[in-house]
Image (cartoon, rainbow, N blue to C red):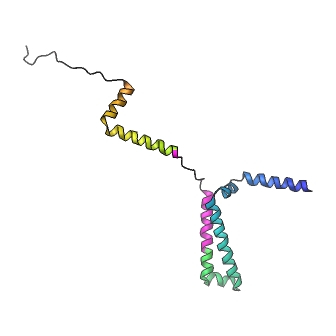
C-alpha cells in the first residue's frame, strides 16, 4: 500500500516538476508576491463580508471590502500577466560591453581621420603616393 502512495507521490512530483507554470511560480519572486497579496486581500474581504451578516450588503456598501477585492483583483491580474509573459532574461554584461566597444570604435572611425587611415591601411595595404605630371603643355607647342 505504501508503494502505491510512494509511486503516486513520485508521479505527482515529476508532473509538477515538468509543469512550466509551477516552474515559473518557483523561480519568479514577483509572481509569488502577487499571489500572496491577492490571497491575503481576498481572505480579508471574505472575512469582513461574512462577519457582517449579509455578504451582498458588505460588498456593495463596505469600502474596506471593496478595497480588498480591488487589491485582490489587481494582484491576480498582475500574476496572470506574469504567467503569460515570456520569461525575463538576464541581460548579459558581456553583450553590453561588446555593444559599447562597437559603438566606440564606430565613433572613433567617424570622427578621426588618422584612425580611418590606419584601418584602411591595415585592411587594404598602404596607399602608394605618386605625383602626376601632365605631358601636355600650356603654350600649345
Q: Is residue 124 left or right of residue 87?
A: left
Where residue 9 sits: x, y (%)?
Answer: 82, 55
Residue 62 drawn above or below residue 20: below
Residue at left offset 61%, top offset 61%: 30
Where residue 103 sits: x, y (%)?
Answer: 41, 42
Residue 60 drawn above or below residue 98: below
In which image quadrant can residue 13 be found?
bottom right
Residue at left offset 67%, top offset 77%: 44
Where residue 57 sits: x, y (%)?
Answer: 65, 85
Q: Is residue 46 left or right of residue 125?
A: right
Q: Magenta stretch: dominant SS?
A: helix
| Residue 80, magenta (yes or no) | yes
Residue 29 drawn above or below residue 141: below
The residue segment tinted magenta is 70-93
Q: Residue furthest bottom?
A: 53
In which image quadrant can residue 121 be found?
top left
Q: Is residue 71 left or right of residue 2?
A: left
Please identify the quadrant where the C terminus is shown.
top left
| Residue 104, magenta (yes or no) | no
Residue at left offset 32%, top offset 30%: 117
Residue at left offset 60%, top offset 65%: 77
Q: Is residue 53 left or right of residue 85?
A: right
Residue 106 drawn above or below residue 32: above
Q: How many marks?
A: 0
Q: Nearer the viewer, residue 98 or 82?
A: 98
Amino acid at each position: 500500500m505504501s508503494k502505491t502512495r510512494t509511486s503516486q507521490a513520485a508521479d505527482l512530483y515529476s508532473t509538477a516538476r515538468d509543469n512550466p507554470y509551477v516552474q515559473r511560480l518557483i523561480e519568479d519572486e514577483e509572481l509569488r508576491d502577487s499571489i500572496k497579496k491577492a490571497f491575503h486581500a481576498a481572505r480579508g474581504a471574505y472575512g469582513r463580508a461574512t462577519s457582517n451578516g449579509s455578504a451582498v450588503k458588505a460588498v456593495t456598501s463596505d469600502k474596506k471590502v471593496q478595497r480588498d477585492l480591488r487589491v485582490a483583483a489587481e494582484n491576480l491580474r498582475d500574476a496572470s500577466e506574469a504567467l503569460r509573459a515570456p520569461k525575463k532574461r538576464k541581460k548579459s554584461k558581456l553583450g553590453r560591453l561588446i555593444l559599447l566597444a562597437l559603438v566606440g570604435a564606430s565613433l572613433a572611425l567617424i570622427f578621426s581621420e588618422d584612425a580611418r587611415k590606419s584601418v584602411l591601411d591595415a585592411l587594404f595595404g598602404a596607399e602608394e603616393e605618386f605625383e602626376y605630371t601632365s605631358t601636355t603643355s600650356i603654350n600649345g607647342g
